[in-house]
Amino acid sequence: MRYTDGKVHDITIAYIGGGSRGWAWNLMTDLAKEESISGTVKLYDIDYDAARDNEIIGNSLSMRQDVKGKWLYKACETLEESLKGADFVIISILPGTFDEMESDVHAPEKYGIYQSVGDTVGPGGIVRALRTIPMFVDIANAIKEHCPNAWVINYTNPMTLCVRTLYEVFPQIKAFGCCHEVFGTQKLLSRALQDVEGINDVPREEIKINVLGINHFTWIDNARYKDIDLMHVYKQFVNKYYETGFISDANDNWMNNSFVSAERVKFDLFLRYGIIAAAGDRHLAEFVPGYWYLKDPETVREWMFGLTTVNWRKEDLKRRLERSKRLKIGEEKFELKETGEEGVRQIKALLGLGDLVTNVNIPNYGQIEGIPYGAVVETNALFSGNKLKPILSGKLPDNVNSLVLRQVYNQETTLKAALKKDYNLAFSAFVNDPLVAISLKDAKKLFNEMLENTKKYLDGWELKV
Amino acid sequence: MRYTDGKVHDITIAYIGGGSRGWAWNLMTDLAKEESISGTVKLYDIDYDAARDNEIIGNSLSMRQDVKGKWLYKACETLEESLKGADFVIISILPGTFDEMESDVHAPEKYGIYQSVGDTVGPGGIVRALRTIPMFVDIANAIKEHCPNAWVINYTNPMTLCVRTLYEVFPQIKAFGCCHEVFGTQKLLSRALQDVEGINDVPREEIKINVLGINHFTWIDNARYKDIDLMHVYKQFVNKYYETGFISDANDNWMNNSFVSAERVKFDLFLRYGIIAAAGDRHLAEFVPGYWYLKDPETVREWMFGLTTVNWRKEDLKRRLERSKRLKIGEEKFELKETGEEGVRQIKALLGLGDLVTNVNIPNYGQIEGIPYGAVVETNALFSGNKLKPILSGKLPDNVNSLVLRQVYNQETTLKAALKKDYNLAFSAFVNDPLVAISLKDAKKLFNEMLENTKKYLDGWELKV
Amino acid sequence: MRYTDGKVHDITIAYIGGGSRGWAWNLMTDLAKEESISGTVKLYDIDYDAARDNEIIGNSLSMRQDVKGKWLYKACETLEESLKGADFVIISILPGTFDEMESDVHAPEKYGIYQSVGDTVGPGGIVRALRTIPMFVDIANAIKEHCPNAWVINYTNPMTLCVRTLYEVFPQIKAFGCCHEVFGTQKLLSRALQDVEGINDVPREEIKINVLGINHFTWIDNARYKDIDLMHVYKQFVNKYYETGFISDANDNWMNNSFVSAERVKFDLFLRYGIIAAAGDRHLAEFVPGYWYLKDPETVREWMFGLTTVNWRKEDLKRRLERSKRLKIGEEKFELKETGEEGVRQIKALLGLGDLVTNVNIPNYGQIEGIPYGAVVETNALFSGNKLKPILSGKLPDNVNSLVLRQVYNQETTLKAALKKDYNLAFSAFVNDPLVAISLKDAKKLFNEMLENTKKYLDGWELKV
Amino acid sequence: MRYTDGKVHDITIAYIGGGSRGWAWNLMTDLAKEESISGTVKLYDIDYDAARDNEIIGNSLSMRQDVKGKWLYKACETLEESLKGADFVIISILPGTFDEMESDVHAPEKYGIYQSVGDTVGPGGIVRALRTIPMFVDIANAIKEHCPNAWVINYTNPMTLCVRTLYEVFPQIKAFGCCHEVFGTQKLLSRALQDVEGINDVPREEIKINVLGINHFTWIDNARYKDIDLMHVYKQFVNKYYETGFISDANDNWMNNSFVSAERVKFDLFLRYGIIAAAGDRHLAEFVPGYWYLKDPETVREWMFGLTTVNWRKEDLKRRLERSKRLKIGEEKFELKETGEEGVRQIKALLGLGDLVTNVNIPNYGQIEGIPYGAVVETNALFSGNKLKPILSGKLPDNVNSLVLRQVYNQETTLKAALKKDYNLAFSAFVNDPLVAISLKDAKKLFNEMLENTKKYLDGWELKV
């Protein structure tokens, strides 16, 4: 790297994954808009052709006149090649294929278990983790060998266990996990400010919050805009919209888009616990007992959110692959608009180009009281000149912490199970998951079936049939 | 108190409760057999006549020639009178009547929630706690005022929350809770030793164990008899009897006695978690998700334990009251046999008459790692000359700790709810209970109904109807 | 307070102390230069006339055309009056007079104990603390009563014990202590950057550091300017100047100004411990055994720093009082230059006018590992919208932590001694102070003499003569 | 091992060291008196002839008719041979020779540093530790390889660092350190009971105490005999004898025996701190600033204890070697009297032959609050059936803890220095030692000289001359 006049040149970023395109294109866009940094992005995907496509798309972008951030994109044939000399590593992989994900999400349905996402916790999240952890063991070992001083940004789910695995394998790693779910809640608070106080268009960055919890089950216990206490504003907002739900955009609501909700789960949690759950309702619902919000499709409809099917994901992937073709041959161009992601801002802060405080996922060194040290948690942290220092964020109320800890211990158990390839340990996490509210006998049948469906990624396991 | 030649005279014991007789008579019997201590037992019960009856029964016992421990029994009309000058306080009350307990145990059944005991956790345990905590607030305050230096022994359930309340109100209190459930597991290990190794009649005191957990959900992670590792012995024993269950006494089994089980729940937990659950199956089943062992009466039968009905308790109380009459008029006499309780041995050790190591319930000062400080836990402790010092007992495996912590946090939440009379907090504990595996709507209906049934003990609460 | 267009009006600041002028004038200057905030400063000093003088000086300043920040200054006759309605409280008092300070600093000299400052630790610091703590008890109680939600900024020494007392008396207080010593070390790092790397005039704010320790004995274990590791730069710098010392300004050096040093103590500590001590040498020398750097005036000269005499302070005060007269009658005017203090920037950040990360003194909630919770420590913290959240700063190396902990425990003991007026406790802190390297008998004589000299501030103590 | 009728046969004990005879003979005596255990003692010493002598002496003892405990003694030529198959390992070595110890103890005298023992802390203790730690690294590795499940009892000084090293190298080791200093304080309490209350001859085991601290600097904050609070008794006793000192045996006092004291240091510490220091005055004096009790020989005389010279030790060794000859050829016989050591009772308890509570040195797992986890501390612990579980012992008052922590951190630093062979780290411990109250320049000269004198045990170090 080379520093001149407030700019940094010759940065090397290794991008692991990206074959499914979404996140890689976001990064390209954000890099293109930023003039203070430049260098090379080395693309690695297990599907080399996908990486090659991205190379072509990225380099054409760099050649555009309206692009300020000029980067060279380069596909690599091996993980090692991409990592060598990297200053930053970005990990955004799909662990397995959508076929395995189909089993994760939908196999449990015949036992009455419905999942709105299925990639974080719940039976789907646990089995996905068992499959993903060995991949992250390999990545961590490769980073340890090839670029131990690089900063590592993870976007892959299950976020908590991916980051946790990196630190388990290589405790000195400089890794963190990024997720935009909290940003969405900041935006909701901005909408509440508009609705209750008539203050319009406050950008989410000006909504100052204290964040604590775990990824996709994060909480806000203090929110402020200038001299306004947003906890109070939100209370009025929730009371107004609890029954009807709050729909931001009538054209894009929970009935036609399974990624959108009417925030009723969030509102219900607020009324019962007094602090703000800070993730989408689809995620929140999966962290609590299945019989609360995910009992059956009717209950889900009552709470006004959707179940994202893997079929939809498969279709969506097709659309992205088609777009990829168009981008490659120049039939389509990126629009250089806000992606809402923070990766590039974080990179700048770590390079010493201005401090940044935002929420990240890293091991608990004491930033949250009441959660075991070492477990990966989500709080605010300060990014500043090659340092990432968490901000002390206090503790959750006991009744919320109980819900969080159940998942934290399950995640720790899942990690150990994956590393030791221990069926019994894994099953103990599975039956302790709040969504797996079925008999021990059924749970065993379901677990065995799900493992069977993902067994090609479970090398060395002794499966029970 | 007066010490002479290894004996202690003029001890004053306040006995709070005892109207339902069982535990009071056990104490009388144990005191009668012990020659090294003597003094006065002051009996207080909200039913003064019951205390008077016990006074008569106790004093006749003291007059018997075969009795070595001579105590004067004296009924007191007020709590204060009984506590003044007390060296020891024993608390063994029935919080409310069996009518409230009937609601605790059986009201949930119409929502498909079955409880085998209903006095510790589960919907019954939580509502019982809400009723009991204010009573213990009063007792703690009275002890603080009238006998702050007395040692306080609690036998009342819910054990954890009773002891927790005493310390919350009067942090300097010298209180601990006693429970014989762990002793039963030591006896089972003795039976396993006989069955597997052919070593007969090993007394439970010679089964050396490390104890950790919370009352009625206690665990043993290390057990030894001389040079024999009992964890290994128990494994063979469990494998042998897992399917059939183990019945100690063919004449007194789980089919005709709801207090007895065939240990299948204990065996199943061992196979899944690798350490020994150390309480009766009826208790253990209530600490884990209802759909595991308590889904419905058929499931309970499959796991070979019984549901103790409150009707049975009412009948049993009648039998005890009749026996009380016979004892009072001398138609019946106590047999001076082993009760299996340890209260008198603990009193002796605290008086400096020989050290004792046994399991007790006191706040966590670090004796268990991984459970919050201040929560009441059960481990071994050393009783020695006016000191009670817990023994460092290590930590539970993550997957077991998760089950335990769910209850610990629920208990802390229940305590706060009872002290603040906060409906919302109480409800958050209620819906987080593993037995309350029903919809939020049903949970609210059930909770309201149960509170209604116990409302005369919920002074100052704002109930929702 | 009123928010409009990025400005905040009608702020009320209570300024406690200021009679000795220095800090009060700095605040006036900083407020005058800042246009985004305005309101009233209520001045309280036990010397009412001094407050009146400041009122006149402040208001004339506000009337100047070149002043952007318009504040109304108002002297108050009572502490209560000044605190009522305050949004911010600034505490900058002289505890006692320079006569007591003369005893603090110079009485120990006849026992061979030399102090370069004598207001933080050492025999002088301890006795000053015993005198100051009761004053801060009163201030804390008054804040609790009259403005419990105000932010409280302390500048008074002994910093750690002043802040610690505020929290001891009123745990919910929103207080922090500010000190510019760390800034001085940032400036030294900037000089090192110039000397070693030829990079000139880097402002101290761009020197990114991790701060940990206690006030006046703070350490930096990580320092960076853009891509340059300043730990490495500093090492070269120290090796170059260890023997000769480093003198920034030939006209203002340690031989003619007892506030200046040649940094040799700091360099020696770096060579021995490997991390950067971040305070002036005069302060640092007082935190370690007296026989290291303060054995006698010759040793002090060898290490190239000065002993600030109280006589000098008395003369300096006279100069300030004369200047006060000139300012009052308009014979002299403030120059609106940089004071280097951060109070106004912190106030702005707390008002929500932009985040700020800087070092502060607050109780340890976990921001430093290895120092007891609750002890007041100095680390970076994030100021943001009515919140002050410490940044997790890691732990000191064991050998440094040992030096720090000796003072931390001494401070805790001093606090307890002052609150309980307990001679024995106070003496145990006194003889454990690293500067008090004399026999127990001499220590007792000295301690008694020093208490005698300050006894009018030791109401309720039983002194031994 | 073989268990029959409450006895255990075929036990294997490895005894490492013993060439200087004292401790080995104590063990032989204690084993000879105990009928419930038997087996083989394998003797290893770097001086093989010494081990052979002990073999002969031990076996003749076993052949005596009045001996109940029959053991086979067997000298081994290698450490490995002695450890193979060991159930217990006893370590009691002299690290280096009395020539190195002469430097440890007496070299500092020319700088005015006097040491009464010089084997635990102080300049002598630190340098001895640097020499000893590599030996314990070797022993720990050998135990890990040859008898990882053996119980390891250490008697070697510096106790804390010997035990700490064993755990550092082999964290799963089952080791503990034994020391009789606390027993001496129990005996003193028994004498106080006699003097103040007229109760004679209470055996030390009946003095119930709570122990906390580190070896040779251990404290008692609670002591009781039956219903008598010994803290109160001790206070009266101290007040009576503070000035004159207390001399148990007029024929064996501090003026003619440097191992004996008049307890004045202990009394002074009690008056200043309010709790009982529980080690001999010679040890206690070394843990606190040198200018308190060890300023010069006159001060030592005033405090009525002695400086044990290494010359005395050399003479004493000669006497023991002569006695060894007599024992070997049968000219002298052991008297089977009480040694006062507890090793054999601990072994029995670990074998399951009855529980034992006594004080031991093991890593801090939470048994003492306020001392870092992992540091070796001394508290009571329960020995029971192959388990050693510390008893929660609370925390020291802040002012005492400060003195203790200074040593704890010094010990941790010394350990790291020895393992890394890091001169700077070692020197930072050296100058932080409370006895090293001299200038940095002198400290460096002394340290270099002392290292030079012991350099043959400092393989791999880069010494500065």
Image: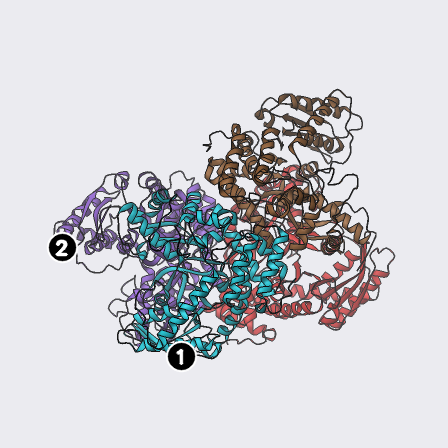
Chain colours: A purple, B red, C cyan, D brown
Task: Give percent across and percent down for residue D106.
Answer: 60, 35
Task: Give percent across and percent down for residue C203.
Answer: 29, 56
Of the two numbered discs 1 and 2 in the rendering, the one whose residue sits closer to the viewer: 1
The residue closer to the viewer here, A133 or B137, is: B137
Task: Name the amino acid type tagged 1.
Answer: Lys
The residue closer to the viewer here, C317 or A459, is: C317
Instruction: Identify the residue under disc 2.
Output: A332
Do discs 1 and 2 share a chain? no
Task: Name the amino acid type tagged 2.
Answer: Glu
Q: Quadrant of the N terminus of chain D?
A: top right
The residue closer to the viewer here, C307 or D246, is: C307
Does residue A393 show up?
Answer: no
| Chain ID, mark 1 | C
| Chain ID, mark 2 | A
Badge 1 vs badge 2, beta-carbon distance below 8 Å: no
Instruction: Identify the residue under disc 1.
Output: C74
Give the left or right position of residue D95, taking residue C29 as reference.
Answer: right
Note whether A425 is above or below A190 in the view shown. above
Per the model, the C-alpha gap separating discs 1 and 2 is: 67 Å
